[in-house]
Image (spheres, grey):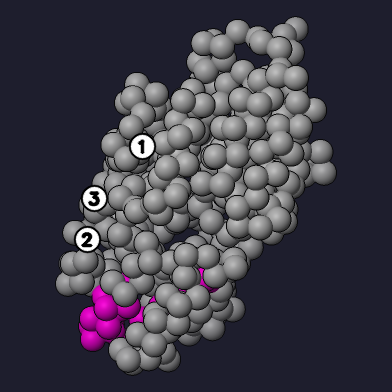
Amino acid sequence: MSPRVRILLVIDDLEYGGAQRQVVELANGLDAARFEVHVCALSEYVPLAQGLRDRERCLHVIPKRCKVDFTVVPRLARLLRRLKADIVHSYLFSAAIAARLAGRLAGTRAIIGSERNTNYRLKRRNLWAYRLTRGCVDLIIANSNAGAAFNSRLLGHNPSQYRVVHNGVDTMRFHPQNGEAIRQGLGAAKDECVVAMFASFKQQKNHSLFFAAAKRVLAQVPKARFLLVGDQLYGSQDGSDVYKACMTRLVEELGLRERCLFLGNRDDVERIYPACHVTVLSSLHEGTPNVLLESMACGVPVVATDVSDNRYVAPDGEVGYIVPLDDVAAMADRICRLLANEDLRQQLGKQARTWTEREFSIGQLAKKTEAVYLEALAGHPTCAPSA
């Protein structure tokens, strides 16, 4: 029997975020008979690690001691050697740079990067770090076609280095349920329609569009209730504390405060989705949004902006609606259309569940990622680690 391929997934942290959730899902979903999987976080803030199977064995933490900590590279290289890792696969900036350098230092056979987003701006020092280490990465797994094209333009990688693997969702955890009791438990009245947004407070998520649409929805559906799940980023990264404060003021200015429920970060989102009649994603840019997959898996139709691969992930008119970016009127119209027609809502919800099970299961995520891993190793015969 062939020995298992040893994988180390490296990520900046395991806070409440999309990339972090996908690392956990992938680690749990890879074929344990063929792959020995470990996860390394560069921060001690790891709330999502509780979802890792065999956490005690597979979780490693190499905390950054300051914003720019060059000791992470040799420490990570030591871990790669100790685990005899065949592949290091990184997510997010700090992990990407550290994994590229540590992988080379440790003689790891294959170094794989990730692209999780589109149309963002990098700080100049981050851009140069990516470009200076460009030759260290073998393949890059993007979670959207748009992300692969964007990353290739931004960093100068050959398009042939990219493999697109859309995100996956645990369709056993996220499944349709009767949401009436859950709604009341959250503070929504029995006769209220719940419109939800699941998103961290960061500029990319474009909460202002959601709140502007909510104002219009209330004019037609006075008993609409708006549910916000998510909070500012850990350590107020990227000015998320300032952004959240601005959005809080906007809610007050629009007179929406009494119609909004702010739940913060939650570990039980699989219970909250079924409590919703509609979920909304108003993002300026995305990769593959986990919240669309999770909502659809729960049989809840979605309304999302037409960015990245959203039109493929959530086919317009089949599982919900796709609207032009920053078109407040269109977003409000589609939300109201779903709230006003229970039969339509149920039909689209059922189609959303079927579509997600077929195209975006964890099994599909794992199978496609495993193929990339084996392809990467095929191009790199076993070599001895560096001294």
* Residue identifier under label 2: 325
Which residue lies under the disc numbered 3?
Answer: 316
- Measured as percent of width and height from the top left, residue 162 is found at 39, 27
Mark 1 or 2, which is nearer the eye?
A: 1
- Label 3 or label 2, whichever comes before in sequence order: 3
Q: In this orientation, which residue lies closer to the viewer: 11 or 316?
A: 11
Total marks in image: 3
- The quadrant holding residue 244 is bottom left
Residue at image location 75% in from the left, 33% down from the top: 79
- Callout 1 crowding tier (Cα within 10 Å): few <14, some 14–19, many ≥20: some
Magenta segment range? 210-232
Q: In the rendering, at what x and y percent does residue 343 appear?
A: 30, 62
Instruction: Give how far apart the Cα atoms at labels 1 and 2 are.
Output: 26 Å
Marks 3/2: CA distance?
14 Å
Residue 155 badge:
1
Q: At 50% from the left edge and 79% from the top edge, which residue is drawn?
A: 262
Q: In front: 229, or 206?
A: 206
Label 2 element class: loop
* Between marks 3 and 2 in the image, the one whose residue lies nearer the viewer: 2
Looking at the rendered image, the disc whose residue lies closer to the viewer, 1 or 3, is 1
Three-letter amino acid code of the residue under disc 2: Leu
The residue positioned 42% from the left and 75% from the top of the image is: 243
Compare residues 172 and 370 and report the one nearer the observer: 370
Mark 3 is surrounded, within 10 Å at the Cα level, by few (under 14), some (14 to 19) or many (20 or more) other residues, namely: some
